[in-house]
């Protein structure tokens, strides 16, 4: 529509610019909708993969806890420092957030829950952050951060083992006397529960009273077997937490992008209606002016 070329008054210029701007906005929002839809589909695929990994990891972690409880019960809690509670002079909290944003309230929920926990502590508490978003938040809060790790795209046993070794070394060197881990537990696509649990000292799950006790022969010794199981249990627990957090992150991003895609569609519909109304008004005004000019010439 080029009304202003023939009738260069203010009203027609405004109409032309308005129609042009609305059209440009519609095109821009359509491009954004394509991006958010693609991100939604990618997040859905990643969430499905992470959910399958969790289903495999949970039974393994539970079996590991049962084996560890059995061995610890026979060896006794005092045989290894990872099992023995001690006077608490310093604490460590490992917080797991995402590396990237655009995942709704995923990071806000975990950082808020962690901050509330930290504010309730009367003992000096330090952070280790896994994920950039949590690190940036607590860096802004000027909280002491002992270390920062990127949230890996691919969660592997070896990667979790490196983190576990770092934490065990900090505990055994008496820098910290208790270690917690804070993360979003994945329950379903729409439900993620901010969770904080104790990681070290390890508290073996008591065996049911009805369960029969079987004697085993441990080679080379029960103490060596227990030491290896304790280290492996911490790795498995960290891996499980990262998998839970990854699934919660992907599901939160999928829901957020689905909502953004829906909102973009609603905006496009509203702008299309405005565009059609403005275009119709411009055409009507143009016809009226032509008819008026013709009548003036005839008169």
Image (cartoon, rainbow, N blue to C red):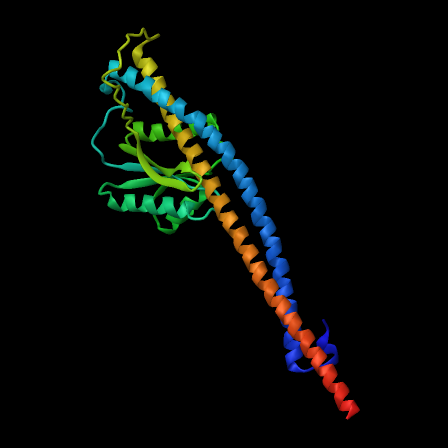
> Which quadrant of the figure has residue 65?
top left
> Which quadrant of the figure has residue 67?
top left
Q: In this image, 81 relative to 183: left or right? A: left
Q: Nearer the viewer, residue 16 or 150?
A: 16
Q: Nearer the viewer, residue 172 or 128?
A: 128
Q: Residue at the far bottom: name it.
A: 299
Q: Residue at the far left: name it.
A: 87
Q: Percent from the top left, x then y, of residue 96?
A: 40, 39
Q: Percent from the top left, x then y, of residue 101?
A: 48, 47
Looking at the image, which residue is at 24% across and 20% down?
77
Point out the image quarter for the N terminus: bottom right
4 vs 207: above or below: below
Q: How many marks?
A: 0
Looking at the image, which residue is at 31% across and 7% down?
216
Looking at the image, which residue is at 29% across and 16% down?
70
Q: Percent from the top left, x then y, of residue 241?
A: 40, 33
* Residue 176 seen in the figure: no
């Amino acid at each position: 529509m080029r009304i202003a070329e023939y009738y260069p008054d203010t009203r027609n210029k405004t109409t032309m610019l308005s129609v042009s701007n609305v059209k440009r906005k519609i095109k821009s929002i359509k491009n954004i909708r394509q991006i958010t839809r693609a991100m939604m589909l990618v997040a859905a695929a990643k969430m499905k993969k992470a959910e399958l990994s969790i289903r495999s990891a949970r039974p393994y972690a539970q079996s590991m806890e049962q084996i560890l409880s059995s061995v610890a019960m026979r060896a006794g809690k005092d045989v290894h420092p990872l099992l023995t509670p001690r006077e608490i002079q310093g604490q460590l909290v490992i917080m797991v957030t995402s590396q990237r944003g655009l995942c709704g309230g995923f990071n806000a929920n975990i950082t808020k829950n962690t901050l509330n926990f930290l504010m309730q502590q009367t003992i000096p508490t330090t952070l280790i952050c896994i994920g950039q978003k949590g690190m940036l938040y607590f860096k802004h809060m000027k909280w002491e951060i002992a270390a920062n790790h990127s949230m890996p795209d691919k969660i592997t046993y070896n990667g979790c083992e490196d983190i576990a070794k770092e934490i065990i070394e900090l505990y055994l060197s008496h820098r910290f006397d208790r270690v917690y881990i804070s993360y979003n537990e994945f329950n379903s696509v729409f439900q993620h529960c901010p969770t904080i649990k104790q990681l070290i000292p390890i508290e073996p799950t008591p065996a049911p009273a009805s369960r029969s006790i079987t004697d085993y022969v441990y080679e080379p010794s029960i103490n060596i077997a227990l030491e290896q199981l304790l280290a492996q249990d911490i790795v498995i627990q960290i891996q499980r937490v990262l998998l839970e957090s990854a699934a919660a992150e992907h599901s939160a991003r999928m829901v957020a992008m689905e909502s953004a895609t829906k909102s973009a569609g609603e905006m496009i519909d509203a702008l299309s209606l405005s565009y059609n109304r403005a275009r119709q008004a411009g055409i009507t005004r143009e016809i009226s002016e032509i008819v008026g000019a013709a009548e003036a010439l005839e008169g």
